[in-house]
Amino acid sequence: MKKAREIAFLGIICALSVVFLMLGSILDVLDITAAIIASLLLFIANEELKAKSLMVYFATVVISLLFTFVGSPLPAIEYAIFAIYPILKPVIEKTPRIVSYILKAIYIVLASCGTVLLMSFFIMPFAEPRTFFIYLLLFILVIVLFDLLLLRFKRYYQFKLRHTLKIDRFFN
């Protein structure tokens, strides 16, 4: 019975994530927002089921890429970049503090460069190089704010949201 509940929970998280990513691909303005909301859903799955949340990550990426005929594939690829961080963050934070900061900085730079390259390919292929540098700085800021959001959301989820949504009773 417990395995069936886990599978149902992971399926609901995956379905909600795909819906948010599809909305983000239809409304091009919300592409990064949809990827971050879907990442928060993955964070919830990671809090409850740890390593099994990787299945949600891969399933969401594959399913959302299959539905790119509706809109652009940009939110699905951004989700692939951003959503791995809620899974990596607990592993990174178990390392010593200095190593943790270095690993976070490496992720921030790589994810920002990947997102800027993605935007240069899909959205603005003939833009000036100066605008890419500005976007790189903006994405670094977005990922730092995303890290702070995860820190706050973790507290909120553990103390309030988990009980309100009755997830704590679901797995008992």
Image (cartoon, grey):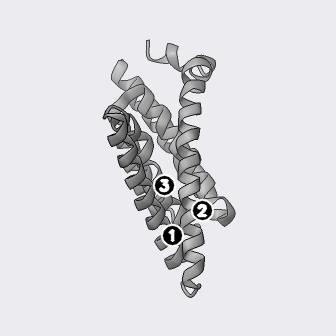
The image quarter in which residue 159 lies: top right
Dot label at residue 116: 1
Asked where in the image residue 61 lies, by quadrant, the reply is bottom left
Tell me which amino acid carries mark 1.
Val
Disc number placed over residue 79 in the picture, else none: 3
Mark 3 or 2: the one toward you: 2
Residue 138 badge: 2
How much space separates mark 1 and mark 2, taking CA atoms? 10 Å
Q: Nearer the viewer, residue 116 or 81?
A: 116
Residue at image point 62% right, 19% down: 160
Q: Is residue 69 visible?
A: yes
Residue 90 left/right relative to 76 = left
Q: Residues within 10 Å of mark 3 (few under 14, many from 20)?
A: many
Query: For the N terminus, which image quadrant?
Result: top left
Residue 29: image location, x then y, percent: 68, 63
What secondary structure is found at the residue carrying circle 3?
Answer: helix
Q: What residue is at 49 percent from the left and 59 percent from the top?
A: 78
Q: Earlier in the sequence, mark 1 or mark 2?
A: 1
Tell me which residue sits at (54%, 49%) in the image. Answer: 144
